Amino acid sequence: MLQETVDAHVHLSERRDDTLIRFARMNGLRYTLDELLGTMRRHKIARGLLLSPPLKRAVPLPNEEIIGLCRRSGGMLAPVITVEPTAKEVKAAVKLGEENRREVKAFKIRLGYVKASAESPVYDRLYHYAESAKLPVLFHTGDTAFSNGDLARSHPLTLDGLANKREELTMILCHFGNPWFMDVAELIYKHPNVYTDISGLTTPSAYAEKYAKWLARKISEAIYYAGGAERVLFGTDYPVTKHSETLALVSRLDIDERDKEKILSRNAKRVFRL
Ligand SMILES: [Zn+2]
């Protein structure tokens, strides 16, 4: 039986100061809850994990608004709590996770956008809670959406030390470390607790056709190196990348059909316990 697809990386807000509106416009998207749910149904995407988009003034949308949007989605969207690097924010995020235990599926750290690295002690309390509650932590890795991002902190290899120290922590490296795909291949090969997603890798460009082929080849090669697709997750990064484009990327991968099914559905169901 064909499994239902899970989108492990979705953004949405109803705020005019949402900085992802720029990407929605580039992709010709309305970027509304109705559009998102309609598009998911059309592509047979049964569940999506909803993450805060960045607002102007460099702050993420409050997590309470993410939980609210998920409640209006009729069970199609589940919240991921974004955690900023202050003791107060970490404490609040853990509390929100506790209070909404049945709904919250993961936490997210915005490496490259915040002034802390993954191993900063400020996150210790969060990692401890995530391990005990068996909730994965998503890390932004690789290219940043704005020119003032901090690549030294978002480089995927900065996660190796944390994965060494915390074998009980499930870590998801977003965007396959773009463009450091082979670094991520090594991390998912080396660490049983490290996963990655293929979200947000395509945006409109003059070389879109050639880039799409190049990208499919790179991701396929990373999967050969890792020896399988057990820890690769489908994600769109809506509205940064359109659903149709990320699905096309999966179909272009030169891997077994069974592995494509793992990427689209099985891996996410296992890691997020959906
Ligand atoms: Zn994202």
Image (tube, helix red, strand yellow):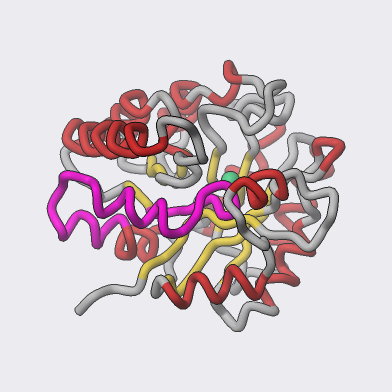
Please report the residue visible at 63 percent of the width from the left and 40 percent of the height from the top.
109
**Can residue 128 be seen in the rendering of this structure?**
no
Q: Residue furthest top?
A: 152
Q: Residue furthest left?
A: 256
What stretch of residues is rendered in magenta?
A: 234-263
Q: Quadrant of residue 67?
A: bottom right
Give residue 153's position: percent from left, percent from top: 60, 21
Say if 184 sits above or below 20 in the image: above
The C terminus lies in quadrant: bottom left
Depth order, front residue of 205/145: 205
Please report the residue visible at 59 percent of the width from the left and 68 percent of the height from the top.
36
Horizontally, residue 77 falls left or right of residue 91, namely left
In reply to whether residue 239 is colored magenta, the answer given is yes
Q: How many marks?
A: 0
Say if 63 sits above or below 38 in the image: above
Depth order, front residue of 22/156: 22
Q: Quadrant of residue 216?
A: top left
Q: Residue furthest bottom?
A: 74
Depth order, front residue of 20/49: 20
Horizontally, residue 2 falls left or right of residue 93, namely left
Horizontally, residue 137 falls left or right of residue 145, namely left
The N terminus lies in quadrant: bottom left
Please report the residue visible at 57 percent of the width from the left and 74 percent of the height from the top.
37
Q: Residue furthest front?
A: 206
**Can residue 114 be seen in the rendering of this structure?**
yes
Depth order, front residue of 208/179: 208
Give residue 238's position: percent from left, percent from top: 56, 54
Please report the residue visible at 59 percent of the width from the left and 74 percent of the height from the top.
102
